Image (cartoon, grey):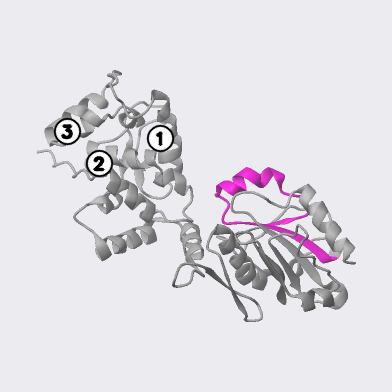
Amino acid sequence: MELSLPSVPRLATIANRLAEIFPEGVSHRNYCVRAVAARTVWVMLYAGAVDGFDRWLRPSMVTDMSDRQAARHTDADRRKWYARASSPDKRRPAGAWFAPNSREQIRDETIRLGLIPNGAVIERKGVPTTSPLPKYALATDFAALFDEKVSGTSLHEAFGRWRSAHLTKAALARVALLKRGVTKDKASVLVTYPNGHTRKLAPGPSSILSKAVIEEFGPRFLEEPAVLFLSESASKVREYDRDLAEALGLKIDSATNLPDVVLADLGKSATEVLVVFVEVVATDGPINEKRKGALLQIARNAGLQDRNVAFLTVFSDRGCAAFKKTVADLAWGSFTWFMAEPDNLMILHDGKPVPLSSLR
């Protein structure tokens, strides 16, 4: 006797829940939450392609779905559709959801880069990579998250249990770090300076990265960190420790095109003070060769030696789009730090001595 097929939720339910299941910070989140992902999950549920049912999906089932077929929800209709959709029959219905060439997007991005690595989809064993046979299915516990009979606190607790069981430690760290520092009114990001002073920044990914630089990077890689300068692009507000900067011989002009953060390490003697120019990259703007040269000139104009200056570009994680977009532009002789892996540091070594306190 065949098992009853799983219930089919509304497409809007799937779209809304995917955005909550995969919060900001999850690797390849875009592939897991966009409209094509919601339709892919919907078709899997419609097909009964859930672990334990021995029914599997191939990307053409998603591209060839139509509104007319989607409106037919009886088990008989769904079984008849599945038999045809998993056969060699190549006929496409009128009003198909996607163009035929969208199969690669569904297979390579939504499923292989998004849902499988994050534990939401399983792959049929023993089926060659090049085989046209259906071979993808939802993991049982992931499929259960779309049960419309479950809502409220019970649903959010289920989301949390699933994330804890399936997301990698790095992914969970990214999610936690992106949530940190948001005040109760969710209208700002609270940053605590090394001297204990606090400041609120406008909400947004750049502010969260700046907070991580000051609270996480500084204590790990500088002996006695201090914040010389912090800019907030959202409101064009810039503030800096004028007394400390001048004591170090650094004349900071707030009108100058300075980076997002300037740190100093006060753990060395006056001749060995280290100034770190930091760019946080949520979308664009790393320290490339041109930017490095301009910042180095600012330091030289202030009387600093090259050995007393370091350059740091900060990203949320190695899998983020901003890093992939700009990694080829990062300057030699600079450092790269990822908020999701705070104990690690990437060095673009150019053969010269490394000017960072804990690595000297």
- Which residue occupies 38% across, 58% down? 163
- Give left or right: position of 332 versus 126: right
Quarter of the figure with residue 11? top left
- Which residue occupies 38% across, 61% down? 164
Which residue is labeled 3 in the image? Answer: 72
Task: Calculate the distance from the C-alpha at mark 2 to the C-alpha at mark 3.
Answer: 13 Å
In this orientation, which residue lies closer to the viewer: 256 or 29? 256
The dot on residue 156 is none
- Give left or right: position of 59 versus 25: left
- Which residue occupies 30% across, 44% down? 138
- Which residue occupies 21% across, 43% down? 8
Residue type, mark 3 in image? Arg
Residue type, mark 1 in image? Ile
The x, y position of residue 87, in whole percent, is 26, 23
Question: Going from the N terminus, do you reach mark 2 or mark 3 first?
Answer: 2
Q: What SS does tag 3 mark?
A: loop
- Give left or right: position of 121 versus 31: left
Q: Residues within 10 Å of mark 3 (few under 14, many from 20)?
A: few
